[in-house]
Structures are given as C-alpha cells and as structure tokens.
Image (spheres, rainbow, N blue to C red):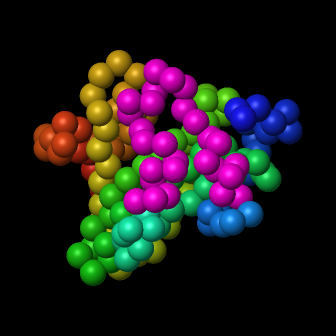
Amino acid sequence: MTMQKQENVQKDSKITLREVTRDNLDEVLRLKVAEEQSKFVAPNSTSIAQAHFYPEEAWFRAIYADETPVGFLMLSDEAKKAEYFLWRLMIDEHYQGMGFGQRAMALLIAHVKTRPNAIKLLTSCVPGKGSPFEFYKGLGFEPTGEIEDGEDVMELLL
C-alpha cells in the first residue's frame, strides 16, 4: 500500500515532532523518499529497528504537518559524551519542497540546544547527485573534512 498525499497538508501547516507509537507506526513505515533518493537514507523500518537496539542514544520522532505524518528524523544523543549527531532525516516524496525538512531541523536544533554541553550538531551524507549536502549547507552545516563510512561529515556550531 503506497501513501498518497493528503490534500489538507499545506506549506504553512504546523510542523511538530512526535513520538513514534503503536498508533502511528504503520503510517511512519509507509513514508518513503523518491526512488532516486533511496541510496541517501535508510528506510524508516531500518531506522526504528536500529533505535530499539540503541535505546540509550537513539532519539527518534515522526515529523508531522498538522495531523499528517510527512517525515522522520533520528538523533544520536550521547549526553554523557556531549555528542549529538543527526542520524536520519527523511521527508516523504509527496511532501518534499514544502519547507518541512528545514522546519523540522529547526525544531531538532532547538531540542539539541537543550541537551547537556551541546556545542555542535554533527551529521553526514553520501556525496553525489541528489545528495542532501546542499540542504545541510543551507542550514549552516559546514564540512569537517572527515569521511566516515564513505560519507562527508558536517557540523553545525550551536
């Protein structure tokens, strides 16, 4: 069953980050990026499975536009080390280009700023055509020059 765009979702819909629960799990699992983007982000099912094996560090949320799930994000939150890493971010293919990713990131950044000794947020992305590299640069992330698992590491100073 594929997800269809909800007509009530508008560019000015209120963006919130909500826990993934039994009630919304199926909807979150149906969210998908466009086929050509699938090499840049793991499916939500993989992310949620990984989160359950790293409960001490994985902080994950569904991204909602009003009452419709439109995306997913996951943070590696290692407060004891004061290390914060955007592990996953995806917006469903039907809702891209509406500013939801930027607005969800603003909420995530605000959350990270509340964490102990948070001075930067890290992320990484696969280089290449269609990579989210420019998206992250537009949010203020800068390349660190490090490569981890074939991905360019980027940081945002908070």
Residue 41 is a magenta residue: yes
Residue at figure coordinates x 54%, y 32% from the top left: 33
The quarter of the picture where residue 50 lies is bottom left
The quarter of the picture where residue 17 lies is bottom right
Residue 20 in the figure: left or right of residue 51 = right
Closest to the observer, 29 or 77 = 29
Single out the residue that lies furthest toward the top: 129
Residue 43 in the figure: left or right of residue 120 = right
Residue 137 in the figure: left or right of residue 108 = left
Residue 27 is a magenta residue: yes
**Looking at the image, is 56 positioned above or below residue 157?**
below
Q: Quadrant of the C terminus?
A: bottom left
Answer whether residue 130 is visible to the viewer in this image.
yes
Closest to the observer, 13 or 34 = 34
Residue at figure coordinates x 61%, y 30% from the top left: 93
Single out the residue that lies furthest toward the right: 8
- Total label count? 0
Give percent across and percent down for residue 107. 55, 58
Give percent across and percent down for residue 114. 45, 74
Residue at figure coordinates x 37%, y 43% from the top left: 140
Answer whether residue 105 is visible to the viewer in this image.
no
Give percent across and percent down for residue 135. 43, 34
- Identify the magenta region: 24-50
Closest to the observer, 152 or 28 = 28
